[in-house]
C-alpha cells in the first residue's frame, strides 16, 4: 500500500508543478508521476529535507524541484521541436 501511496503523491506533486509553471508535462499521468519522483529527488538534493512530509516526500522541496524539472523539460522539448 505504501508504494501506491507514493505513486499518488508523486503524481500530485508533478501535477502541481505543471500548474505552477503553466506548462503541460509530456506523458500525462505517467509523466506527472515521473516528474514528481524526479523532482522530489532533485528538490531534496538541492534544498534539503525540510517542511511537511507525506509518503516520505518533503512536499515543499519536492514541488520546487518538480517545477524546475518541468521548466527544463519544456525548454528541451521546445528546442527539439524547432530543430525539426
Image (spheres, rainbow, N blue to C red):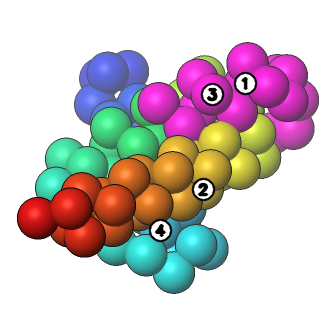
- Give the left or right position of residue 72, taking residue 24 as reference: right
31 magenta-colored? no
Residue visible at 58% across and 23% down in the picture? 41
* Chain-order first, disc 4 or disc 1: 4
Q: Is residue 52 left or right of residue 16?
A: right
Which residue is pictured at 70% across the width and 33% down the height?
43
Gap between marks 4 and 1 measured at Cα: 18 Å
Residues at discs 1 and 3 in contact (Cβ within 8 Å): yes
The residue beneath circle 3 is 42
Report, in whole angstroms, how far the alpha carbon at label 3 lies from the one at label 4: 16 Å
Q: Earlier in the sequence, mark 2 or mark 1?
A: 1
Q: What residue did someone put label 4 on?
A: 18
Using the image, determine if residue 84 lies above or below residue 51.
below
Q: Nearer the viewer, residue 81 or 49?
A: 81
The magenta stretch is 38-52
Neighbour tally class for label 3: few under 14, some 14-19, many 20 plus, Cα within 10 Å? many
Q: Residue furthest bottom?
A: 22
Q: Which mark is residue 67?
A: 2
Q: Residue at x 32, y 43 (%)?
A: 33
Classify mark 3: helix, strand or loop: helix
Is residue 47 magenta-colored? yes
Location of residue 49 in the rendering, given as x and y in whole percent from the top left corner: 82, 22
Compared with residue 20, is residue 53 higher up or lower down, i.e. above or below? above
| Residue 8 shows in the view | no
Which residue position is annotated with label 1? 44
Amino acid at each position: 500500500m505504501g508504494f501506491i501511496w507514493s505513486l499518488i503523491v508523486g503524481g500530485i506533486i508533478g501535477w502541481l508543478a505543471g500548474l505552477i509553471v503553466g506548462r503541460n508535462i509530456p506523458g500525462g499521468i505517467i509523466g506527472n508521476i515521473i516528474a514528481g519522483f524526479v523532482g522530489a529527488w532533485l528538490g531534496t538534493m538541492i534544498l534539503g529535507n525540510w517542511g511537511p512530509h507525506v509518503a516520505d516526500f518533503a512536499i515543499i522541496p519536492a514541488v520546487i524541484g518538480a517545477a524546475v524539472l518541468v521548466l527544463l523539460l519544456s525548454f528541451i522539448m521546445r528546442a527539439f521541436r524547432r530543430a525539426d
